[in-house]
Image (cartoon, helix red, strand yellow):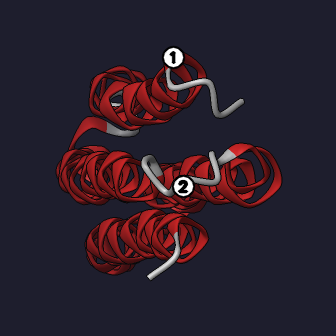
């Protein structure tokens, strides 16, 4: 296969990792949100915000995919030496986005389930803890950008 094909597959895998992880993470939060809203419908705004947090990893993965298509593929050397490297980098990104969004959804679900009991006081703490998990997704994106740059592909 050509290096462009390997890189394209890598970009697609990165996007799939972000999308699958975000879907699972948001489903975890939304499931907890349903139960929470049955107890206290006044927590709707907090539930929506917390349940949506894992969606950001899809955006990070989309950025990686756009970088692969617009910057990396045009700069691949003709000898085909870096196509598989791009695939590997994108797999690492996919894993970072996948796992960080799933576990962020778990953190958010825990906070959502406690909103009625704490009358919403747990919201800020849950946001802060969810941001810690989000950082892994951000680092996955930064890793890709740095590595593509170090390989001379951007």
Task: Indicate left or right for 12 with 124 as reference.
Answer: right
- Where residue 125 sits, quadrant-wise, is top left
Q: Residue furthest front?
A: 79
Q: Residue at x 48, y 34 (%)?
A: 144
Cα gap from disc 2 to disc 1, whole angstroms = 19 Å
- SS at mark 1? helix
Q: Residue at x 29, y 52 (%)?
A: 88
Q: Name the front one of labels 2 and 1.
A: 1
Residue 64, percent from left and from top: 60, 49
- Where residue 127 sits, quadrant-wise, is top left
- Asked if residue 29 is positioned above or below residue 43 in the image, the reply reads below
Q: Is residue 43 visible?
A: no
- Asked if residue 66 is positioned above or below residue 9 in the image, the reply reads above
Q: Is residue 62 visible?
A: yes
Residue 18, percent from left and from top: 44, 63
- Asked if residue 95 is positioned above or below residue 31 in the image, the reply reads above
Q: Residues within 10 Å of mark 2 (few under 14, many from 20)?
A: many
Disc nearer the start of the sequence (2/1): 2
Residue 90, percent from left and from top: 40, 53
Q: Nearer the viewer, residue 130 or 34?
A: 130
Q: Residue at x 54, y 55 (%)?
A: 61
Which numbered marker is on residue 26?
none
Q: Quadrant of the N terminus?
A: bottom left
Which numbered marker is on residue 61?
2
Task: Say which residue label 1 marks.
Answer: 150
């Amino acid at each position: 296969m050509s290096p462009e094909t390997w890189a394209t597959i890598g970009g697609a895998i990165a996007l799939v990792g972000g999308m699958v992880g975000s879907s699972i993470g948001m489903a975890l939060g939304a499931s907890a949100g349903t139960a929470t809203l049955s107890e206290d419908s006044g927590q709707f705004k907090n539930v929506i915000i917390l349940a949506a947090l894992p969606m950001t990893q899809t955006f990070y993965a989309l950025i990686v995919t756009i970088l692969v298509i617009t910057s990396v593929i045009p700069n691949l050397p003709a000898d085909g030496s870096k196509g598989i490297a791009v695939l590997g980098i994108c797999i690492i990104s996919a894993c970072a986005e996948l796992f960080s969004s799933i576990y962020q959804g778990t953190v958010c679900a825990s906070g959502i389930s406690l909103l009625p009991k704490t009358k919403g006081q747990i919201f800020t703490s849950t946001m802060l803890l969810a941001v810690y998990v989000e950082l892994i997704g951000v680092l996955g994106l930064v890793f890709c950008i740095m590595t593509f740059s170090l390989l001379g592909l951007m």
